[in-house]
Amino acid sequence: MKTIAVLPFANFSSDPENEYFTDGMTEEIINALAKIKALKVTSRTSSFYFKNKNIPISQIGKELNVGIILEGSIRLSGKAIRITAQLIDVAEDYHFWSETWDRQLENVFEIQDEISLLIAEKLREQFGHFEIQEHLVAKQTESLDAYEYSLKAKFHFNKWNPEDMHTAISLYDKALELDDKHVESYLGLADCYGFLATTSFMDHAEAWQKAAQLTHKAHQLNDRHAGVYYQLANLAFFTAVNYKEALRLTIKALEIQPNYVEAQQFMSFLYLIAGKRDRGVLHLNKALEIDPLSQETLFYKAYYNYKTENYEQTIELLDRCLEHNPKNIPASTVKSYCLIKQNRLDEAINYFDTIPSDIVIEADKIGVQAIAYALKNDAFNSEKLRNRLLEFAQNIENYHAQSYLFMLYAATGENDKAFEWIKEAMENNSPLLHLHFVDPLVNSIKTDPRYTEFQKVIFQEIPEVKKAKKKKELLDKETALNYTNRLLKYIEEEKPFLDPNLSLRTLAEQIKINPNQLSWLLNESLNKNFSEFINGYRVQHFKEKVADTSQRHLTLLALAYDSGFNSKTVFNTFFKKVTGQTPKEYWKEATMK
């Protein structure tokens, strides 16, 4: 698969406040290229890790495991915008294409589409066939101001803290005041409230209710948006407690956009909590391919190790998460479970006193301590904390306390009470039932026959993501042969390769076939990509010129340009790749004959 990372474009505007716009444009190009199913595009989080860092391209390519890097800059002045972009072959370490656009800002979506399509075309020309849609970027809104508010909101959202989250909410609200049909702002707002709900910085029920209203509005406006189905999946899991529906909706998101890293992460999570480790690791690995440097992906990797009971590796990964963000609530919680499983019971008891007090959930602290004391055979402290959990659990909304009672019953061998909790949790639609049912902390009850029966009912039949059906060949054998003959005849007679601006798309227009068909034809019938095919003719033409004594007054570079090359670097690199010699070595050898 072709792999690319889009590095954050540099802000060359005189106003540093335009950083939000530069970041937003970069992200839009990432999202556009991610729609191409045959292209693996590194997600925003990992690409932006290298922002403002002076690191060699070869090292970036290695860390992200990609073959191509896109980098560029944006200069915004009033309503005028200049964008530059260049593509770099990581292995060969050379720029094989660059372009500059001078455009007007009111056409921002057309600009994004134009740039993304051209980048996709150049990747296909250089590295082989994949199909490209007619458009990669749709017009989000008629209001440029609404779009700018949404970009500013996204800029603050990506800082992942409560203060910036509230700033993002106010900016998304402003965007929707200007355009109440802006899907991206509805989804952005839903994301904000989901963050506040899961991190307990807002009332759980109120935040999820707002997220639900916003997501359903987005769904009404666009039922073919991967982000819509991802948000609906989160709602199905965390609010409706419908595991199967959450799985179905996540699968739908991935069918629309296989490169959607958050959906790959969530799919891994859904399989892991059902005990389907083999399926879970497949999606985790896909998430790691797309987003190898993300803190969120790192947490899911730790979570996989926890579910597979590799506690030492789990703690190592969680500590990396916590070093980056000491207020990472899920990382802290899972680490406390690992301490129990490693029999580091005193550390588990004191753990919540070592983390920031404003992220401590009281039920988590009491629950972990109750289990640790029970396993220490400290009946007095365990019973005291159990009673506190029972008091907390009287409030039907206190799911945390209820789930810790379940894990405490399992840990102390009180199987009947543990299964009674499972039964009640199913009746009450507890959102933590699925989360803790296969947790390693309840291993002691997994040999009980009742456990297997409940597991069948709770998770039912779990569907898999369907493998994409093999697509029908773009051309049948007879048509492919006819088109190949037409192409080769045109090349020999018209010599279009002498045009330095020749592209796959313009050549397709000249011989009157679809660009996707020409790309396929070159790869399948001639076993070459466009660049190899055209530059092969250019190299041959260069050789003919070198052999012509009347041309020897010209420089090597002049002969290369006369042969259709428009870049010294591309000429030198490709010539040596084909002939095994540098142009200078070839010239010297040829002129001595």
Image (cartoon, rainbow, N blue to C red):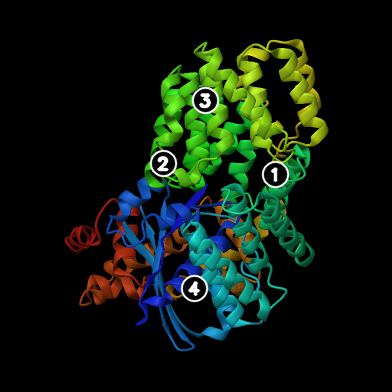
Residue 273 visible in the picture: yes
Q: Is residue 145 left or right of residue 49?
A: right
**In the structure shown, which secondary structural element does the residue marked by tag 1 occupy?**
helix
First reached walking from the N terminus: tag 3 or tag 2: 2
For badge 1, the amino acid type reads Phe
Q: Which residue is mark 1?
A: 238
In space, the residues marked 1 and 2 are separated at their CA atoms by 24 Å
Residue at image point 49% right, 62% down: 163
Q: Which residue is mark 4?
A: 496
Where residue 260 appears, x then y in whole percent? 60, 51
For badge 2, the amino acid type reads Leu
- Front-most of residues 581 and 122: 122
**In the structure shown, which secondary structural element does the residue marked by tag 3 occupy?**
helix
Q: Which residue is mark 2?
A: 322
**In the structure shown, which secondary structural element does the residue marked by tag 4 occupy?**
helix
Residue at image point 60% right, 47% down: 198
For badge 3, the amino acid type reads Gln
In space, the residues marked 3 and 4 are separated at their CA atoms by 76 Å
Where residue 468 appears, x then y in whole percent? 70, 43
First reached walking from the N terminus: tag 1 or tag 4: 1
